[in-house]
Image (tube, rainbow, N blue to C red):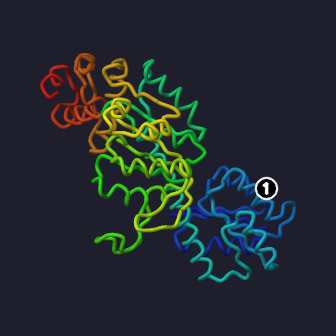
């Protein structure tokens, strides 16, 4: 049921709209002037507002402006029997969802309500999804090691400086990259991730820079690369230590000139990306072995953030395990389970070679195989 607020100084209009909308199954709230309408917006939290333009005491355009100050997502539909094109344009410019002239056409009214409801629901679902995604990348723990990482993120996220994230597999390098993006001025634009280790060396250049149609056998159409897709946002090059030397040379050029060229093409394409790279390798050792370009290393490592292994932040295990326990139970749709104190102690005694990723897998295994309270014996048995 959609809750609809009707603000109009004409009693006949208010009552007729109420009868029509209630007949269609909507919950209707009425207000006879702008001030009463503003109070109803705050108290009733309607899904849609219909507001007359010509009213005593407070004009409809002013009501619209006031509503948008504290309820930006609520669709406001302006109605008027004295409407002009200029009035309609002004209303839309100031945030109105639509403008309908009196006498109101029933079909137009119902279609507008449907469209406004769909938009309102889409905005709500988008916000919910964004919050869910954002929570996925929360940094859990209060150890000195993880607080140092948080401090580094806070200091450098607002800049466009290139960042190299180092640390062992499963320690949370991707999470750090997402946090850097979410706290940057690029957060509303794309976060594009490339796993350099998962893409064959002969395809990495096409993946990063795109290709033109016919540039190789399977290139049946033009394709944009990750650099282009990330323009205005962040490009995360995960496991960059596994990138081929030829691809490294092209990445170096892209970083130096902020330009790329598609495979098989000859036109330069300007790109504006913030590059964050990550690796589990010692790149200085890789440079000595001839596997990594030193000039690229210096381009990428303006700031270095080292993510500690789980064994160096044992005091965070209780918080991490509890977080994963809640997450797994929620995802599986089962009643929440708990960890006994001896289970926490047993988890802290483990050698976490797979780091946080391994801990989450262990917690999921314990949720599936154990009872409502997970004990230390359970941990030692199924670890």
Report x, y in % for residue 42.
Answer: 67, 50
In the drawing, does residue 141 fall left or right of residue 353?
Answer: right
Query: Can residue 171 be seen in this snapshot?
Result: no
How many C-alpha atoms fall within 10 Å of the one at disc 1: few (<14), some, or many (≥20)?
A: some
Residue at figure coordinates x 56%, y 37% from the top left: 157
Secondary structure of the residue carrying tag 1 is: helix
Report x, y in % for residue 283.
Answer: 37, 33
In the drawing, does residue 301 fall left or right of residue 356?
Answer: right
Query: Can residue 236 be seen in this snapshot?
Result: yes
* Viewer-side residue, 195 vs 99: 195
When asked about the image quadrant of residue 7, the answer is: bottom right
Residue at figure coordinates x 58%, y 61% from the top left: 3
Residue at figure coordinates x 38%, y 25% from the top left: 308
* Viewer-side residue, 100 vs 136: 136
Q: Which residue is mark 1?
A: 35
Report x, y in % for residue 287.
Answer: 36, 34
* Viewer-side residue, 198 vs 95: 198
Residue at figure coordinates x 79%, y 65% from the top left: 60
Number of numbered tags placed on the structure image: 1
In the drawing, does residue 315 fall left or right of residue 130?
Answer: left
Report x, y in % for residue 171.
Answer: 34, 31
Q: Quadrant of the C terminus?
A: top left
Q: Residue furthest right?
A: 57
In the drawing, does residue 217 fall left or right of residue 154?
Answer: left
Question: Compared with residue 272, is residue 352 higher up or lower down, i.e. above or below?
Answer: above
* Viewer-side residue, 360 vs 323: 360
């Amino acid at each position: 049921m959609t809750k609809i607020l009707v603000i109009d100084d004409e009693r006949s209009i208010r009552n007729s709209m109420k009868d029509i909308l209630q007949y269609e199954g909507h919950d209707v709230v009425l207000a006879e002037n702008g001030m009463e309408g503003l109070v109803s917006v705050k108290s009733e939290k309607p899904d849609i507002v219909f507001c007359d333009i010509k009213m005593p005491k407070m004009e409809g355009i002013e009501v619209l402006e006031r509503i948008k100050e504290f309820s930006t997502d609520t669709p406001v539909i302006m109605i008027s029997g004295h409407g002009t094109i200029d009035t309609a344009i002004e209303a839309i410019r100031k945030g109105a969802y639509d403008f309908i002239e009196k006498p109101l056409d029933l079909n137009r009214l119902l279609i507008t309500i449907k469209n406004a409801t769909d938009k309102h629901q889409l905005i709500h679902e988008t916000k919910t999804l964004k919050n869910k995604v954002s929570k996925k990348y929360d940094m859990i723990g209060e150890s000195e090691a993880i607080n140092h990482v948080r401090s580094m993120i806070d200091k450098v996220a607002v800049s466009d400086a290139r960042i190299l994230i180092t640390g062992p597999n499963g320690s949370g390098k991707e999470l750090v990259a997402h946090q850097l993006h979410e706290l940057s001025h690029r957060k509303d634009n794309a976060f594009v991730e490339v796993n350099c280790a998962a893409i064959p060396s002969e395809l990495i250049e096409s993946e990063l820079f795109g290709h033109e149609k016919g540039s190789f056998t399977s290139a049946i159409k033009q394709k944009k690369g990750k650099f282009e897709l990330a323009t205005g946002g962040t490009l995360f090059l995960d496991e960059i230590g596994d990138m081929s030397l030829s691809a490294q040379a092209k990445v170096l050029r892209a970083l130096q000139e902020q330009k790329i060229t598609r495979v098989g093409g000859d036109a330069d394409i300007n790109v504006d990306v913030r590059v964050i790279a990550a690796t589990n390798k010692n790149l200085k050792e890789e440079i000595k072995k001839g596997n990594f370009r030193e000039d690229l290393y210096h381009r990428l490592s303006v700031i270095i953030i080292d993510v500690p292994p789980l064994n160096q932040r044992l005091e965070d295990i209780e918080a991490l395990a509890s977080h994963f326990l809640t997450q797994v139970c929620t995802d599986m749709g089962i009643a929440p389970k708990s960890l006994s104190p001896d289970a926490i102690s047993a988890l802290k005694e483990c050698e976490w070679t797979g780091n946080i990723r391994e801990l989450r897998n262990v917690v999921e295994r314990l949720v599936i195989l154990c009872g409502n309270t997970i004990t230390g014996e359970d941990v030692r048995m199924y670890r």
